[in-house]
């Protein structure tokens, strides 16, 4: 033990200790600066703002900064195609050289979706279903029915659309809804002697609908033709009909 203590006091021991510490320090400094060089510590740049730019402009900016990019697409109906709608990382984020920037652009063609089942759903429920499918509610109109604010029919481009049919995402769908008055009755007008325009006006005022139109003889001018018969016909046994009942008309020339 005494010899070891004496050795610790010798110059040779001190030199060995200093050499060992120096070696460790050199190794640590070498590792630190090597890692710093490898990772380019402190070197980088801020990601530019690319939202709203055309994709060609965005790519040009990224390439000029030495950044890579990947592109994905979505369809947004109210925005022009080819525009950057989102980016990752966000603008002004500090990144290293050669970092990949992920861009989302608006495509110029809407993907198709299957039309959902909205028949007999309430207006609020049907609207929510449309939005979940990426569709939009257009106009609403009403027709006589015992159910109120319930979807009786859905229209796309003026034509009925059924569950499962394919249409572009973002399309506007019009609804025909029940007005809750389908069981009410109204006076049946007598349309004999009316022109077709007068008959239409009268039916609309009575909340009835125009059914089929047939003609007697040769009609040279429908504007001058008059109603010569109707079905159903007002009589002693039939004075009222349900709201929305179609009334069929027969027209003939006035001079017949």
Image (tube, grey):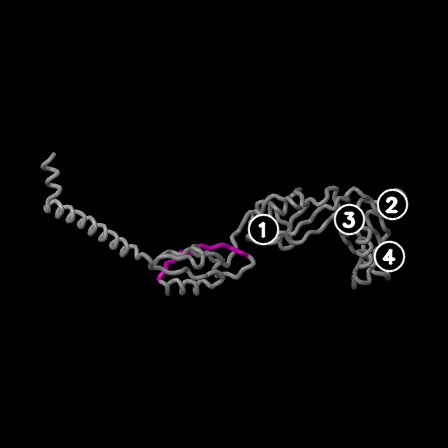
Q: Looking at the rendered structure, which numbered label has been put on residue 8?
A: none
Disc 2 crowd rating (10 Å Cα; few below 14, some 14-19, many 20+) is: some
Number of marks in picture: 4
x and y, in percent, of residue 58 in the image: 43, 63
The N terminus sits in image quarter: top left
Please name the residue that numbered disc 3 is placed on: 246
The C terminus sits in image quarter: bottom right
Q: Looking at the rendered structure, which numbered label has been put on residue 135?
A: 1
Please name the residue that numbered disc 4 is placed on: 193
Label 2 vs label 1: CA separation?
Answer: 45 Å
- Mark 4 or 2, nearer chain start: 4
Nearer mark to the viewer, of 4 and 3: 3
Label 1 vs label 3: CA separation?
Answer: 33 Å
Label 4 vs label 2: CA separation?
Answer: 19 Å
Q: Looking at the rendered structure, which numbered label has been put on residue 239?
A: 2
Nearer mark to the viewer, of 2 and 1: 1
Q: Is residue 8 left or right of residue 198?
A: left
x and y, in percent, of residue 131 in the image: 59, 49
What is the span of residues highlighted in magenta in the rendered image? Answer: 66-76
Q: Is residue 74 magenta?
A: yes
């Amino acid at each position: 033990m005494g010899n070891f203590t004496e050795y610790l006091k010798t110059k040779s021991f001190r030199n060995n200790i200093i050499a060992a510490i120096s070696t460790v320090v050199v190794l640590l400094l070498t590792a630190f600066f090597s890692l710093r060089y490898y990772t380019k510590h402190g070197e980088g740049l801020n990601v530019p703002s690319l939202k709203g730019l055309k994709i060609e402009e965005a790519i040009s900016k990224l390439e000029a900064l030495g950044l890579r990019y990947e592109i994905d697409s979505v369809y947004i109906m109210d925005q022009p195609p080819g525009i950057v709608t989102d980016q990752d990382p966000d603008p002004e984020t500090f990144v290293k050289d050669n970092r990949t920037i992920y861009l989302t652009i608006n495509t110029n063609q809407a993907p198709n979706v299957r039309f959902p089942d909205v028949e007999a759903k309430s207006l609020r429920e049907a609207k929510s279903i449309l939005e979940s499918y990426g569709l939009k509610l257009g106009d609403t109109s009403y027709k006589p029915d015992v159910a109120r604010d319930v979807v009786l029919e859905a229209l796309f481009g003026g034509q009925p659309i059924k569950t499962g049919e394919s249409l572009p995402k973002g399309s506007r769908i019009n609804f025909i809804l029940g007005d809750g008055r389908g069981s009410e009755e109204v006076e049946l007008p007598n349309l004999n002697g009316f022109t077709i325009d007068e008959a239409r006006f009268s039916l609309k005022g009575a909340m009835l609908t125009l059914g089929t139109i047939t003609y007697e003889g040769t009609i040279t001018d429908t504007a001058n033709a008059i109603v010569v018969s109707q079905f159903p016909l007002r009589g002693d046994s039939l004075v009222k009909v349900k709201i929305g009942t179609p009334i069929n008309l027969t027209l003939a020339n006035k001079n017949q």
